[in-house]
Amino acid sequence: MPNRREFFRATAAAAAGSFVMRGGYAAFAQAAQGAAKRREISIGRKRIKVIDSHAHLGIPAVAEVVKGTPFAKNVNVAPNLVVGPDRVRAMDEWGIDIALLTQQGGWWYGVPDRDLARAIVKTQNEGTAAIVAKYPDRFIGMASMPLQFPDIAAEMLEDGVKRLGFKGGGISAGFAGEKELSGPEYDVFWAKAQELGVLLFMHPGGGNDIGAEKHFGGKGALGNTIGNPLETTMFLSHLIYEGTLDKFPGLKICGAHAGGYLPSYLGRTDAQCIRQADACTGKKRPVEDYFKTQIMVDSMIFREEGLRHLVAEVGAGQMVYGTDMPFGWPANPDFILNATFLNNAQKEQILGGNLVKLLKIAPAATN
Amino acid sequence: MQNRRDFFKAVAGAAAGAYAVGRGMPALAQRGGGGQRGGGAAAAPAGPVKRREVFIGRKRVKVIDLHAHCTVDGVSEVVKGTPFERQAGGRALDQDRVNLIDSEGIDIQVLTINGYWWWEVQDRDLAGRIVRAQNEGLAKWVAAHPDRFLALSSVSLQFPELAAEQLDYGVKQLGLRGATIGGHVNGESLSLPKFDPFWAKANELGVVVFMHPGGADNIVKPDAWKARGDIGNIIGNPLETTYFLTRLIFDGTFDKFPNLKVCGAHGGGYLPSYFQRTEVACDVRGNAMCANKKHPREYLKTNIMADTMVLTDEGLRHLVAEMGISQVVYGTDNPLNWPVPVDMIVNHSTLTDAQKEQILSGNLMKLLKIPAAATA
């Protein structure tokens, strides 16, 4: 599973650097690192709550759980993935009030032992809960789950939500091996997410689910540049076309990196279902309808024109702000705040309003 | 190469197929051809049709289609008795194609033979003869309909030097206007130095290279598309194009051959519509090792072109916004029945009349070196 390792290598590399990008084209130059004064974002005169849906973390205590197992080498928690004062400072600089913390990388999806898988995830989730307890106003926890065992995944999602106070869970597609998340064996998991009424944040792992990862070793970090949006595109397409989203109409899933390619290239999807209706018998609604109701996307599209297209395709009500911290993407909130085509209400929706509503978070005024 | 074969069959089947279905602008309302991958045929009316003339406002504008599939007579004889015998069939161009472009308001259609099954031919002599038959067949059809059709050269890209010769001969001797290629040669990326002779020739001649994908069978495991939604087409095709163009950028091919004009089918795949991640990759990713000398967007605005097959008004607005108006050209995917009527451009909600004309023909007049008088 090279991509799992690559993900952690990238993490380690990022840890060695800082939040300032290497090199960098002028258009993406970010605000210089300065004093740790907390930026407070207002739109017009209204202070809004900025919520980052897409933030990573690691829990060092997992190392003890997997000590002496073949998975010991997978635990490589880089310093910048350990959420503490540095992360809070980075959020302060960009004006992020709250971040949803998700465990990504998914190496534990490869653990064949049920008890070990459960123990890893339990440790991760309890570690996440401890961070949230330490900074209750700044972070929201999202459960990690062993998706190779749909029943335990359901159990751990429920445990995270009911015992640890999480608002949802983080999932990946590529790490589930040969299994298809749209297959019936996963109904128990989707049913639990629907029952709990929580958000699932889907983050890809480089496209290894369709065997593409071996072609992504060349220049341009293709496992990330192409593999990630590809995996998300495949994942969402399967959930749509295989009827999973119809079977569980209460599901709310947020696709990382602007939902991959799919929302930015919707025309071909729709057209094919009209040309070849028999290719699309598993779903009940037009493709765009799922993006208006059940699928949300983060704002990791970096530029105004990309954002404009995304808003036109899915609507501001389905978009959430995302940064991918701590990985140094040019995703500070200014490209949303400065977007000429958005009105103030839409900016607030994207930057935090949609998640305030969905996750039942107190709005800024009551902070 | 399952997808390439399927694609070829679909084109051949479409050519032979359902031309009796009622025609009409709501191409959207038509149904595909019984679920075969690639879809059914566009429905050309039986018998003579009135040629549609396209106007923007009161101005008659020419319409040139860069994305059109076909097969020609003469190839079957060349591969008879070889393992490739079954691939060369299909109904060749005939009057129905003229009727189709008449009914759709296309003044000039630029024909290409796609599927690239002949790239698997390892006998250099046979490879040369197949392409020769294809290109002579195309030239013959164009000569018989000089005002209505142009064609791009097939090439034997598994033999890059031969491909360069074929392109040179095709352009200089047969009057072809460029080359058509797939996204990989038997799994190999076209950014590899071994393919430089081909790129050097296209660069030297200043002709367009039209790239059409075949389901990304170079990238994915064999069963990756076994799912609903015809995702081998709707994801596989844009994926192959995206990977192809991305490697030409990051591996430095466009820097080596700065005069190249490479047009990616189906709106250039995902690349232009989701360009931002590509745009920042070299800055953000510590392991990116980018060889490109310029900002990725520079290539998008100069070397890379895309057809209009993003299929929606908003998709086309976005494509033009990302690439610039000079990089977008009309394409229909004839004879496959995608909903790409000329009306999508003529009635576009945000493009100016001048921009519409550029897309419909202006850009291609220059690129294909068509004298203005020739389209009068």
Image: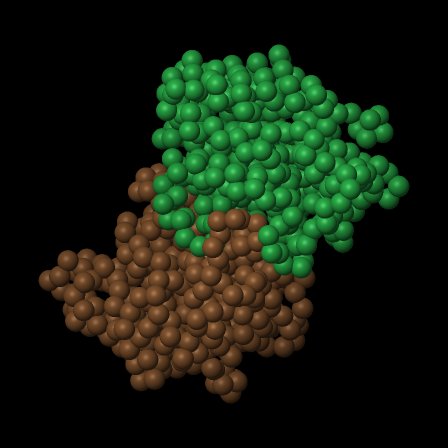
Q: Judge left or right: residue A194 versus residue B10.
A: right
Q: Quadrant of residue B264?
A: bottom left
Q: Judge left or right: residue B215 versus residue A266.
A: left
B65 and B19: which is toward the camera: B65
Q: Colour of chain B?
A: brown
Q: Colour of chain A?
A: green
Location of residue B176 with respect to A206 vertically, above or below: below
Location of residue A25 with respect to B144 vertically, above or below: above
**Looking at the image, which residue is at 19% across and 66% down?**
B76
- Position in image of residue A128 (x %, y %): 61, 22
Q: Residue furthest left?
A: B81
Q: Residue furthest right?
A: A45
- Position in image of residue B175 (x %, y %): 36, 82
**Looking at the image, which residue is at 13% across and 61% down?**
B82
Q: Residue furthest bottom?
A: B373
Q: Judge left or right: residue A280 versus residue A248.
A: left
Q: Quadrant of the C terminus of chain A?
A: top right
User: Residue B90: in sight, yes or no?
Assistant: no
**Looking at the image, which residue is at 33% across and 73% down?**
B197
**Looking at the image, which residue is at 42% across and 13% down?**
A115
Q: Quadrant of residue B295?
A: bottom right
- Position in image of residue B255 (x %, y %): 47, 69
- Position in image of residue B214 (x %, y %): 35, 54
User: Residue A155: in sight, yes or no?
Assistant: yes
